[in-house]
Amino acid sequence: MRYVSTRGSAPVLSFEEAMLTGLARDGGLYVPATVPVLGHAEIAALAGLSYEDVAFRIMRPFIGDTFTDTEFRTIIAKAYAGFGHAARAPLVQLGANHFLLELFHGPTLAFKDFAMQLIGQLFQAALSRSGKRVTIVGATSGDTGSAAIEAFRGLKNVDVFILYPHGRVSEVQRRQMTTPSEANVHAIAMDGDFDDCQARVKDMFNDFVFRDGVRLAGVNSINWARVLAQVVYYFTSAVSLGAPHREVSFTVPTGNFGDIFAGYIARQMGLPIEKLVVATNQNDILHRALTSGAYKTDGVKPSISPSMDIQVSSNFERALFDAYGRDGAAVTQLMEELKTGGFTISQGALESLRATFASGRCSEADTTETIRRTYAATGEILCPHSAVGVKVAEAYLGATPMITLATAHPAKFPDAVEAAMGTRPALPPRMADLFKRQERVTRLPNDLRAIETLIRERIAL
Ligand SMILES: *Cc1c(COP(=O)(O)O)cnc(C)c1O
């Protein structure tokens, strides 16, 4: 399996190289040169298997000869062993034809654990074989950073640096990043918003002297291996509701477009998905783009679903690449225009996107109301991101079963949940002492040189 860049001019890579690299050297994102298609019988045969067995069958064709089957099975088993639910991604019913996929039973209580725990094991296996050391740098609006730190803490061949926007993550998210005591973990509180953090990470990848000097590796949602890990739960949930014999739809609370892009890959692999509904909060660039064709940035408005407070949605580039007939030059041109505020999606590309994706936007007031209402009607406590999903999904309910992704545990966002329902959701017992642990963090300005200097100093130790 070969991987190509969405901008068309970076080297073609293997799975292992694409995973260790993250961002392509032409500024693009890696995608598989071709997506393997599973037959009807192969999908039907997934029914009743464990999460780990489905994960093996879905991901195996993408990893090429990077790992043997036995190695890959071991990696998967280790990745999901720390989850707090035997099903890993259990499905619960909210209404007649509406289901909630609980993706928050991992060690940091958000869906990002599915990808990050796997990537930790993949890196460990690949690096211990080569004896090499890498520096992982990531930007986070809260959940990626905690999931990355949890996945890489204490691993031998890796230093992990996470940039989060100072004052803009929840206290639980911050503490999950600042309390691990392992020396290879470095939390950085940067002045600015998430897009600033993401921009500085991109700058580091584009600074080739720095990139090669510290052996930079990226685990942000642009990393192909993360997208791949997320494809699995689209299969487990759809099959448990009757796929491939009947279609399902998904609604996905979306920020960087990584999670929903995994659904797009599942659909390309042959899973019968009718619609993939993009659910945004008041930071609605994706909803506006799919409605009007205009992808225009407009500043981040902090919301009660902060992990979706994003204006530049990195993985959308992968969807654009396909919508433009895999024309890397066309994507490069769009991304140039984005630097000065935005671009207009061509009519043909927009029609191609709309054949798969629908969209909706949920206001702050509707988010709160949906948490309250869903609890009253079903007893299910939603985090604010999941509530955005549920609200947007309601406009698309019909004959096809709808699966809404619940992306975080409510206790990760206790203030928003308490404001909606009057009670504070409890952390699972395994995390009960989070507020007593010692914090360790470095505050830095939004300045590339300052960040690079800190990283060089820390890894020299
Ligand atoms: C990261 C995150 C999202 C957005 O996911 P993307 O892959 O960036 O679209 C939604 N909800 C929660 C809780 C998250 O942590």
Image (tube, rainbow, N blue to C red):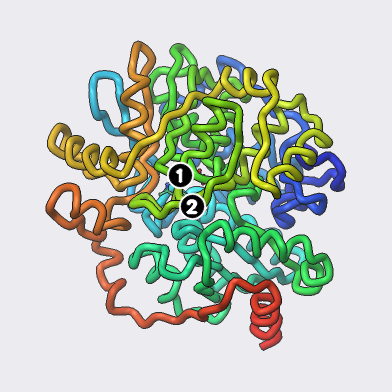
Amino acid type at circle 2 is Val
Q: For the residue labelled by badge 2, is the local secondary structure a helix, a strand or a loop?
A: loop
Q: Label 2 belongs to which residue?
A: 300
What residue is rendered at 58% in x and 29% in y? Answer: 264
The amino acid on which the numbered mark 1 sits, given as a three-letter code, is: Asn
Q: Nearer the viewer, residue 408 or 205?
A: 205
At x 31%, y 72%, the residue is: 434
Q: What is the x, y in percent for residue 42?
A: 57, 21
Q: Is residue 440 above or below residue 408?
A: below
Residue at the spot x=46%, y=70% of the render?
Answer: 166
**In-front residue for pair 3/36:** 3
Left of 82 or right of it: where is 93?
Answer: left
Q: Is residue 144 left or right of residue 325?
A: left
Disc 1 vs disc 2: Cβ atoms closer than 8 Å?
yes
The x, y position of residue 414, in whole percent, is 25, 58
Label 1 environment density (alpha carbons within 10 Å; few <14, some 14–19, many ≥20): many
Q: CA distance from mark 1 to mark 2?
A: 6 Å
Percent x, y of residue 170 = 36, 63
Residue underneath mark 1: 283
Q: Which quarter of the figure has residue 289?
A: top right
Is residue 269 at least partly visible in the picture? yes
